[in-house]
Every structure is written in structure tokens, then in C-alpha cells.
Amino acid sequence: MACQDCVAGVVRSGKLSGHETKIHGFDTYISEPKASAPPKGIVVIVCDVFGWTFPNTRLLADDYAKKGNFIVYVPDFTHGDSVQEEVLETMDKLLAPGGGITATLMKPFLGGRVLGSFVPFVVRNRASVAQPRVLSFFEQLRTAEELPIGVAGFCWGGLHSTQLTHSPHSGGATTKPLVDAAFTAHPVGLKLPSDIAAVQAPLSFAIGSKDMALNMKGVEQIKDLLRKKEAIGIQSEVVVYDGAKHGFAIRGNPNDEKEKQCGVEACDQAVAWECKAQSSSPNIRLPPYFMMLEAVP
């Protein structure tokens, strides 16, 4: 289920190194490794509710490209629709303690502004609407590319990154899996146990211990289900970040040392996982360094 932290957090600042283009009919932000470094694979980011233009997502794509030598795509799966970035500032005011009578009187107004942006997005981009777009992109990408393909999904996008591991083959002309590896951070909307029981590809989770959208009971259920998958050869991991809230991997506060560290570790977890899992893909042979990479414990 969704929670207040779905629309809470901080907008990062920094210089972007990627560019916009159109890929398989979708507007896409693309970040690439240095020209001297051949790409090791492709990672597609499925965004949170703040969409493909959100600075945090694009900066994270740049980090993936730099750290893992990946080509990273951030497609616009919501066709230009997103929760407005200003909602983060509004939510910060809404959650601020104290403030006196004026702040108290303002809270219903602020709450209305948040819901007025968030609820329409959720309705317009519900799974039954968005999933066909996501599948279409990955089916075209798999048909066109020889490189291994990974996915990283956050919050709203975490449901899609998880479900992309369900089908062992695409419905098109190719018999290759849609993804070679998946990374999911603090997902929203997972159905347990069905969404995990259907996993068919390597899957890594990053979840905060204070996540209000997925409690620890649900996390333990995910761990138990994925252990059964490992028994039949499907790699997985679940990393719980102590004290982290929902959204920490994409909207954590860089001025808070704890939040910043959790975000950095989640980034490294994703990169290490994609390197490790994609290295076993039959589509490409990776150098020994990447063959030996282990996911963050």
C-alpha cells in the first residue's frame, strides 16, 4: 500500500551527464559510461511517482553508468505524468512538528495539495494501465539488444521491476528472458505471496526497517519465498537498512549522514547486484573482475 513517505524526501542537486532521446517510442533519459569503457550491460530504471525528469532519478542513473559501466535508460513510462516536485516541500511542511496555530490551520490545506497531485497520478498510472507500456518497452529492447538487460525500480516502479522477473520469456520473436537481473527498492503495491512466488529471474531487494508501505512481517515473507527460489537456482537477496524509511534509496536527505549513507549503500547494492547477476547471462562474457563481484551484504 502507499504511505506518506511515497511523497516525502529531498530533491538532490548536481550536474547531469546524460541526455534525452527517444527509444522504442518512449522519451528516455540515457546515461552512458565513458567512451573508453565498453558497456557491460543495460540497466533500465522504472521511476517513482516523480517521473523520468526527477533530478534524483537522473543523478542515480549517472551513478549507475559511472560505477558499473552500464548504459542506463530512464524511460517515460507515465507519458509525461508525475507528481509535482513541489509536493516534497509541501509534505515537509505538513510533517513538521509544532509551528503554532497558523501551522495547524494550514495542515488541511497542505494535505489537500498533496492528495490533489498524488491520487490522480496513482489512478491514471495504475498497474493495469502502466504495465502494458513497461512490457512493450522491455520486449522491444530485448529483441533489439544483445547486451544483458537489468531493471531497477523504486517505489511505484518497484512493483514493475519485480513483476518483470515473472515471465521467463517475452511474448515476441525472442526466447530470451525480458530481464537478466532486477533490483527493487522499497516497492509499493506488491501482492504477497503471489508477486514473489512468480519470480523467475535474479532479484535483489533494498528495504528500510521503518518502511510504512512494506512492514517487516512482509519482508520476512519475501525472504522465505525467495529462499525457496534459491533452492531451484534463482539468485536473490533482501537487504534491510536499519532506520531507513520508505523512499530512502531515491529521495533520502544528503545532508543527513545516516540517510546519505543508506542511499549510497543502496546504490552500490544495485550496481553490484546487476554486475553479479548479469555476469551469468549467456548474452555476454564479462571480464573476471565483474565475475567476482559480490552483492553488498
Image (tube, grey):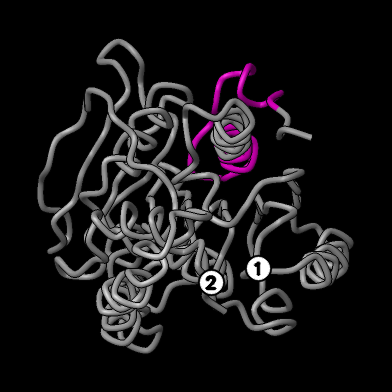
Q: Is residue 56 left or right of residue 206?
A: left
Q: Residue at x 58, y 74 (%)?
A: 166
Q: Which mark is residue 161?
A: none
Q: Secondary structure at mark 2?
A: loop
Q: Residue at x 35, y 21 (%)?
A: 38
Circle 2 Cα neighbour tier, 10 Å, few/some/many (<14 / 14–19 / ≥20): few
- 245 in relation to 249, above or below: below
Q: Give the mark toward the camera: 1 or 2.
A: 2
- Quarter of the image for the N terminus: give it: bottom right
Tell me where the magenta segment starts and ends, as one range.
271-293
| Depth order, front residue of 191/25 | 191
Whether the residues at callouts 1 and 2 have beta carbons within 8 Å, the answer is no
- 155 in relation to 69, above or below: below
Q: Secondary structure at mark 1?
A: loop
Q: Residue at x 55, y 46 (%)?
A: 248
Whole-percent x and y of residue 169?
50, 71
What type of secondary structure mainly makes up the magenta span?
A: helix
Location of residue 16 (image quadrant): top left
- 128 in relation to 269, above or below: below
Q: Which mark is residue 3?
A: 2
